[in-house]
Structures are given as C-alpha cells and as structure tokens.
Amino acid sequence: MNDRLINDIKNLSADLTHMQWYTQQRLQKLQDNKLKALVAWHAKHGEWFRNRLISADCRPADIRRDNMTALPITTRQDVIGAKQRFFAAEVPKGHGKPGEVQSSGSTGEPVVVKCTDVVSLFFHANNHMEVDWHRRDRRLRMASVRAGKIATGEHANWGMPHSALAKTGPCLSINNNTDVKEQARLISEFGTEILSCYPNIMDALMTEWQATDTLPKLKHFKSLGETASDAFKARIREVMGVGVEDSYSSQELGTIANQCAADGLYHTMDYNLIVEVLDEKGNEVGEGETGRVVVTDLHNYASPLVRYDTGDWAVRGGTCECGRGLLTLKKIQGRTRNLIKRADGSRYWPMVGMYNFNELSFQILRYQVIQTDATTMEYHVLVDANLTGLQRQELKDIANRALGAEFDIVVKDHLTPWPLAPNGKHEEFICRAV
C-alpha cells in the first residue's frame, strides 16, 4: 500500500470520527449537497441513468434528500439488464480507475457494478472506525473464517486497512470450506482472542469446542455475512461469554451499518450513504416498523447506485443512547426470499417454532425450513439418528402451532450436514413458492 493511500485512509477516518457526532439535520444537509452533485454527474455521463430521469420527469437540480421518492428505485434486474449502459462513461479526476465488484449471487441474481478508489476508501475507513466503536485492542490475536478464494494460514498482522494505520497482532485466515473440526482445532491452537465468521459457522464451532472441551478464550466475536438470530446471540453469550458485534454490508455498497456497542442498534453510514427503509407504498417507515432497505451510494460516480433496492428488510430504529447523529436500524430481518408467502399472496416474517424445539424428545443440531409452494413447508433437520414416526409428528405439531394449520409439514432428517450456499451463508428460512 502506498503512503498516499495510507494518509487518505487516516485523514478520512479522522473526518468520519468527527462527523459521526453531527446532528441529523447537519448530516442531511451534507447528504443533500452530495446527492445533488451525484445525480448531476450520472445524468450527464450515464446514458441509462439519464433516460431514467427523463422517463420519471426528474430534473437533477430539484432532487433533495427529502423528495427522493421522485427518483425511480433501481433493482438488481435493472443493473443486469442495462449491462454496460448502466455505468458512467467517465469518473471525476481523483476518483481513480473503476474496478468491478460482483455480488455473491445468493438471491440467484448476481450483479456486477463498478466502484472507484473513493468508494474503497470509505469502506476501509468505516472498517477501521468500527474497531474503535467496539474497543477491540488491535494487538490481540484475530482469526477470520471467510468464503471465497481465501488460503488458510497465519499472517503477521490483520491486513488492510488495520495494519497500515496501527500495529496489530497476528491473524489466522481460514477458508470456510475447511472441515469444522479442523477449523475448531486451528482457532483454539492459535490462541484466538477475536473471531470473525458467519453465525452458522460459529454455531457449529461452539458445538465442537463443547464436545472436545477446547473453548478458546474469546474477547470479541464479530459476526459477518448473515443475520444473527436472537437464539444464536443467547447461545454465544452463554457458551463463550461474549456478545455479537455485527456489521451490515453488501458487495455492491460496502458497509451499510455498524452495530453500536451502547445499545445494540445499527448506525447507518450516513456520511457516505443514504439508507431508506420503505413500506409497500414506498414511504419511509416509522421507528419499530419493518420495510425494505433502499440505499444510495453518495460517492460512487462509476455506477449510479441511486435508490438501489438491496433486497433486504430491516426494522427502523430510534435515537441511540450513544449520542451519535447517525440514523439507526433496530434489526436486519433478512431478504425478500425469507418471507413466508400465503395462498392469498400476502407475506410475513416466519415464526417456524424454533423456540419450542427444546420440547422435542430429540436434539436438532441444525435446521432449515423451505417453503416449496403455497401450502407446503419442508423442515430439514440435522440429527444424530434417524427420526421415528412419533418424533416426526412431534416436530410437525410444533411447526403447525407456529405456522398455522394451513401448511402441510414435511420433515426431512439428515445425518450429515447439507452443503452451504456457495457464499458460505446459511438461511434458516427460504421461500421458493412462486
């Protein structure tokens, strides 16, 4: 990493550390100015975006934070369909050469967007600041389990951006395709103090450590990649004695929100993004209400990610007790495909009976519920012995109490874990009903 980039990250981190205490009014004024400049650029240099504005009868000069609904929402299908026409023909001087970023495609719709050096700069600065929010000592030994082209091995430091800005402890990288028993051994023998991985992997690791009495003495657990359920949070607190320190991000947008150590709310990154939470009519939801997450990247001058529908759903939060002016999310619910679909077409967040699994005469090691059509639910359960007919009926009774009698419950038991998605994530509920 060159000295200029290191200085840029240091300076931006210092700026964001200061700006996080701005009032919401001051942050929204900052967003207004950035939004106006962004829309004007893409209207001038982007064929696809310019045509979108013309069709919506929008003038760039009229767009503000408080009237963004005049701008059309951009979907993943829009990006895929536009192909090269989606991107700006050029980017401002100083933003660097755009590089391509591809989403994991966990929805079945992988998209490719272009991002500039400035977008990467904010990603690094937000990551650096998140460590400070949770008061993680950078001298501690960190292990990270991730999907992708990750080689398993030890490194002298934490890597970008942390090692460029401060002296750090060593780091252990593990590819998530590594057998869980081997992951557990490596993490324990490394003397891991900070662990970062998917909740589903951490759940399996805790089971292995308990079985072998080799629990590492963690001081922090950083969740990534998927929603951490309430049941998982309770278990890690009980087993490991630490809480979950979470971030909400995407490949296309980088860090969208970081969890606050004060009360668990997620602060949205309002200095470089505009994060809307919208109801079915496209209006902002109120505190405690659920809506779809629509994000505008205020610094991406290569790709017009303006009112980009992430496919995620979240609960809007209120004022955080920490005093930061950044808006909040109370909970990240999941993706649209994690909603149950009724026969009448209505949708809602599922309660599949997991909180009553302790009533069963057998132990479920992992579960996944798949809605295959309007009236059928498949319960896939990982168990240590094939279920009897009575045990299947026990689970069906719990499922029907949670979901209602309108659904037919099909129980499928597994003696070995089923494969994870290519991105390493495990979704507890998936709707495949058309």
Image: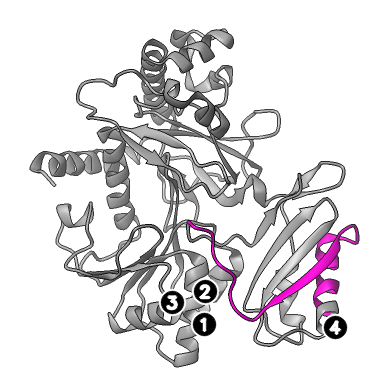
Q: Position of residue 35 (x, y in %)?
A: 41, 21
Q: Which residue is mark 3?
A: 179
* Mark 4, residue position: 389
Residue 107 position within the rendered picture, expressed as x and y whole percent measured from the top left? 58, 46
The CA distance from mark 3 to mark 1 is 13 Å
Q: Quadrant of residue 227?
A: bottom right
Q: Which residue is mark 1?
A: 207
Point out the stretch of residues depicted in magenta. 394-422
182 drawn magenta: no
Q: Earlier in the sequence, mark 3 or mark 1?
A: 3
What is the crowding at mark 3: few (fewer than 14 residues within 10 Å), some, or many (at least 20)?
few
Is label 3 in a helix, a strand or a loop? loop
- Which of marks 1 and 4 precedes in the sequence? 1
Alpha carbon separation for disc pair 4 and 2: 28 Å
Task: Write the residue at 31% across / 50% down.
Answer: 127
- Disc 4 marks which amino acid? Gly
Quadrant hosting residue 17: top left
The answer to which of 277 and 112 lies nearer the viewer is 112
**Numbered circle sitting on residue 203:** 2
Q: Residue at x 71, y 51 (%)?
A: 432
Q: Nearer the viewer, residue 127 or 338?
A: 338
Closer to the camera: disc 4 or disc 1?
Answer: 4
